[in-house]
Image: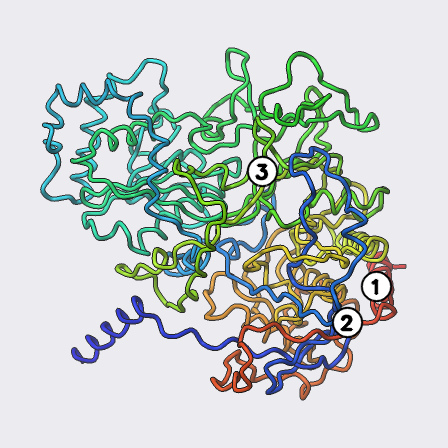
Amino acid sequence: MKSTSSASSRKRAREADHPPRPPPQTRSASAAVASRAGIPRRVPSPTAAVPSALTSFSPTANSPPPSSAASFDAPLFSASRASHRLPASAPPVCTPFKANSGSVRLHANNETPSRCPPSNTVRSHMDLLLFDELHGRVRFDSAELWSRFDVDSFRPVCEVASSLGLHDGQRWTAWPHDTSERNVVDFLEDIFEHLRPALPAHLPFFRFILSGAIPLADGDCTRKTDIAFVSTPAAAGDDAAPSWAHVRAVGELKSNPAKSNCDSTIVQLANYAREVFGNQPWRRSVLCFTLCGADFRVWHFDRAGALGSTVINIHAQWQLFLTALFSFATFDATELGFDPTIRVYRDDGKEDTFDSTIAACSAQPSRPFVWIPRSLPADFGGRAACIGPVPDSIAGFNPDSWTKVELQPRSMAPRWAVVSRTAICARAKLWGTSEWTFVVKDQWRAAERDPEGSILRVCGCKVPGLPECLWHGDLVHADGTPISIPSLRPQSRGSTPADPPPPPPPPPCPSIRKVGDTSKHLLHAGATTLLERIHTRMLLTPVGRGLIQFASYTELLLALHAAIEGHRHMYTAHQVLHRDVSVNNIIILPGSGGALIDFDLAVRMTRTAGSGATHRTGTFEFMAYGVLAGAQHTALHDLESFYYVLLWLCIYHQPGGTRRTPTPRHSLFLDPKIQHKDPIVTARRAKGDCARPEVFRNDVLPTLPKEARRLRPLLRRWHQLLFSGVTDQEVDADDDGDDDEDDDVDGHAQNAPPAPQPGPGEETVQRVYREMLAALEQGVAKLEGK
């Protein structure tokens, strides 16, 4: 037994550092059984494809960016871009899916009473998600990151440290021989106790605390830190664990210097950064540090990944170490990574950057606001605020008029992830008014992708079922250049060649079962071209509530009816396909009805260029079978997603937004708390099973609660409409996603995109629209007893 156990341990260690060769990619699916269902069946040919796709569509292809990113009311799609389709013979761009640490949250809605509960994902599962999320997105040994810390500003502190004998010119005199966590903490506390009086009087000081064995509050997962600089007042007690909403910066202590470069250390910091981003969506970045033995490194996490500094020795470069340590305790909101375009008034009446960590522990309500660089239309109560000089936060726009908009200090839809396009989504109102009639939405969009506002403003008329975009634009620096992630990261001071060679592609993400304590895959993978994500803002109306908060099934069906009508209008009248229909992206509006929102993944069918995206993430629960199988996205796939939204809500939630307890059996949808070996394959198999009438009737419908059984006729009608013609023999139940290694015998690249196939006929698409809407109307009539 002992020898067997040792062999198993050695095998696991080898797998952690030397993962097996990635399996060959899944073979492309073949012709659909029913064209309007888009249900593919596997065949031996590696080049066969799902036919239910528009030939001009690909999962993430989009139009080129507008001509001026600094424009504060971006123009609609230009005629030159809309006048061409992709050639019929052009292969679609099949962007692969990639897991994201936000996928464990069932929905993003953060409003009472349907606030999403914490996922409580254990470290072994979350580490794998974050490893996959950061792979190819980690840059390290960046000396430029140290430029954030000004040694000259803390020169008096360094002189006091020398005069007190804390550092003798060679080493820190109190540095422990045993660098256990407790001993190093005592050393740091001693430094702060002796040197804090030497700080300049004008600098604020935020204390650091130890989490110890107590997890920080308000997290998605149960996590505790070694050191956290926080905004909680000292009166709260040193032993009290703060909320993640109070955390300003995080430190991790390890006794072994070799841990500085390990995957496990980077992922551990990413766990902390994820919790900070989830509780503080107002931030552009999160600062962390590691102290492994006497090796000190600073980390910067943003929505494009992680940037690590070079490693310094705290004895040899003690002044830089001391400066960084006290900078973490004294940085203001902007230096800490908060968005300086989101403002708040200080006690002296002057504007300053909104710091949500201070607001979270203050007894006084906060009133953050933004300046919109134009006057809102008069029918929305807009009025120009052209009094005095242009506010600094919008000076780069050089606007003729501007409007002051107050934000609710809590985001409506926070995102628990690191690499993500989501920033804030907050209710808003004109300053001085009482009604929260607007939504301010910030995102980090890909530079190649058209702004969501441009897509919404292509529909100039007010159409039921769609939000209205009153203003949109890419945020800009004072000189008018776009605010992007590369522009916010420390830049190299050396000259760069005019045409630098492209970086090598990262190695395939290894298939691992555990993030190794000694492996260095994240560093070896390095970083591909840094994601050129641009900070974009929109002002939208009206304000609704999350679909998950439906008060009755009648209200639910009416909201879905309006959303499908809005989807049909954008697709039919403006050739825009949404491509991200989910429970998060449909809202209930006051009165009756709803709207389809979040067009940030939408594309025009007439686009001529790709988005430049390297992967796609999404909620597998609501993705159509064909999309999961690699088909080009069509309108019928979105309509299938509407079906999954209704079914998901009926199975898991009751009117009012409360989640069913106990949780019903997962017959179709995946359990988000389980780390599936291949969630895409698992979701695809579940959707394929659900397409069979017998499986749907015997396994899926029985999971509905008693009060939702009145919706069975509607669900059966939608199922028949979307999956008519599918039988048990026509969907391969044994598709496990594994391919034979000889799939590439013809010399074709295994990752080559499938050949283009004709999409569904327009007559079929419109018929499915009509029949799905008619079925909803019949369902409402039945619920109302008509």
Mark 2 or 3 closer to N-term? 3
Whole-percent x, y for residue 203 in the image = 36, 18
Residue indicated by mark 2: 759
Mark 3 or 1 closer to N-term? 3
Q: CA distance from mark 3 to mark 1?
A: 34 Å
Mark 1 or 2 closer to N-term? 2
Report if the CB atoms under discs 1 and 2 are less than 8 Å apart.
no
Q: Specify few, some or many for label 1: CA neighbours under 10 Å numbering under 14, 14-19, or 20 or more.
A: some
Q: Is residue 80 left or right of residue 288?
A: right
Whole-percent x, y for residue 259 in the image = 24, 52
Residue indicated by mark 1: 769
| Quadrant housing residue 622 | bottom right
| Quadrant housing residue 516 | bottom left
Residue 411: assigned label: 3
Q: Nearer the viewer, mark 1 or mark 2?
A: 2
In terms of secondary structure, where does tag 1 sit? helix
Q: CA distance from mark 1 to mark 2?
A: 16 Å
Q: Quadrant of the C terminus?
A: bottom right
